[in-house]
Every structure is written in structure tokens, then in C-alpha cells.
Image: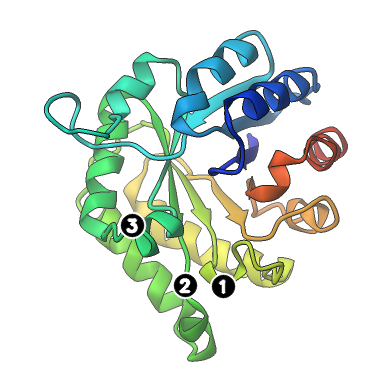
Amino acid sequence: MRYIFGNWKMYLNEEESVRLAREVGELSVAPGFSCAVFPNTLSFLPVRDVLRNSSFSVGAQNVSWVPRGAYTGATSAELFRESGAAYALVGHSERRYIFGEDDSAVRKKIEACIDVGLVPVVCVGEEKHDRDNGKAEYRVKKQLMKVFEGLSIGTQSVIVAYEPIWAIGTGDACSDTEAARMIGVIKEYVAPYHSGEIPVLYGGSVDAQNVHTYLSHGIIDGVLIGKASTDVTIFEKIVTEHT
């Protein structure tokens, strides 16, 4: 299976999200590909309804690890799963570096997703100074160790997304060969944690011009696209030409 995921972040309001979902829902997805979009929480339900009978799944951009209770402003993995989510982004760099989520919180969110059958898309990636100092692999392996060590995954599906922080939203995309190399490192590192193979995606300034270079590498299982996925012309081109 290969994956094309669109993280809409907080670029669209509800009306815009629904309109984009209607257009996206008309796209054909080739066998062997899984496509999903991740709208903001307010737009999740109407987008889910629009895409219910389409080839697209809907995911959560963020989840709380506590199922229910007195947690004002939170939406749990359990509630998203009950509402029809198939995936959840966990540990995205914007959650880590803007909102201060640490590896402990990421680990709890992964466990919460696994407990309810929601597929966590675990985001990892190094900062620019890590790469400049030759510590990209060290940083990514440390993040993986912190969230996977001792985790009981069993046969539950888990996806990892390699998103070098210096490439997200900057237009400075990681080269396809380096992305493939880093994803090979990640696959080797996470292999002992799962009975099967954990898919690893690339994310970071992916667009219609460069997506084919990533998907041409068999070791890269798909892409996680940010702002470009909110432009229907770009997203349609990516989905229709590369699935």
C-alpha cells in the first residue's frame, strides 16, 4: 500500500473545507493507494460526511490521549475514532515546537490511537542545526526511541512520517535521494517494534512538481502534503497523476 495524505492544517474554514472535500471526493484513486485528508477539528464532521462514499478517508490533525472527562478544549482519539476518523497525526513538528508537546505526550497519543484502532501517523524529523552538525540520524532515532521503546503494537497499523523540520512550509524540500536514505534508516530502526513492516512517508514542501521524485523511490511509501493539498488544482494533479 502507498499513501497520499493531505494535512489541511488551519488554512481553511468550514465552508472552504467542505467545498474542497466535494472536489477531492470526485477524484479516482488507483488500487494500491490509500488517500486521506486531515481537516481542522471544526470541519472534521462535515468533511467526513462529504467523503463518506468516496475513495478518501478522513483523519484527525491532533488527538488527546485521555478518552473522556474534564479536559476542556480536548478531543480524544476515542471520540475521533467513534466519529469516523481512520488516521491521526501524532507528534507533528508544529505540535512539538509551537505548542510544546514532548515525547511523553506523543507516546501517550500513540498508545491512545492503538487502543481504539485509530492509525497513528507518527511524525519525526530533525531541525536545521541537527542536519548542519551531522546529527540528523541521531535526532530522528532519539525521537523514535522515545515513542516506540516498550510499546505494544502487535498487528495494529502504525505509519511514520519523516518530516525534516527545516523543510516544512519553507519551499526547501529535502532531496529525494536523502529522503529515501533517511527513510531507510527509519525503517531499519522501527522494524523490531512491529510484526510487519511500518510504512514511512515523506513530508516537507511536497508539491505537484517534486512529488514524483519521492514516489519514484520504492522505499518511500507515500507523501504527507501540507499547504499544497489545500489547492484543489495541485492536489488533483498529485492524486490523478501519481496513483
- At label 2, which amino acid type do we have? Glu
Is mark 2 in CB contact (under 8 Å) with mark 1? yes
Please provide percent x and percent y for residue 120.
Answer: 40, 38
Please name the amino acid that badge 3 sits on: Phe
Image quarter of the N terminus: top right
Could you tell which of marks 2 and 3 lies nearer the N-terminus? 3
Q: Mark number for residue 126?
A: 2
* Label 3: few (<14), some (14–19) or many (≥20) C-alpha neighbours in 10 Å: few
Q: Is residue 160 above or below residue 167?
A: above
* SS at mark 3 in the image: loop
Distance from Cα at disc 3 to Cα at disc 1: 17 Å
Q: Between residue 53 and residue 176, name the one nearer to us.
A: 53
Q: Is mark 1 on a helix, strand or loop?
A: helix
| Marks 2 and 3, how far apart at CA | 17 Å
Q: Mark 3 — residue?
A: 99
Q: What residue appears at the point 33 percent right and 36 percent down from the top-left corner? A: 63
Q: Residue at x 48, y 61 (%)?
A: 186
| Residue at image mark 1 | 166
Q: Nearer the viewer, mark 2 or mark 3?
A: 3
Question: The C terminus lies in which quarter of the figure?
Answer: top right
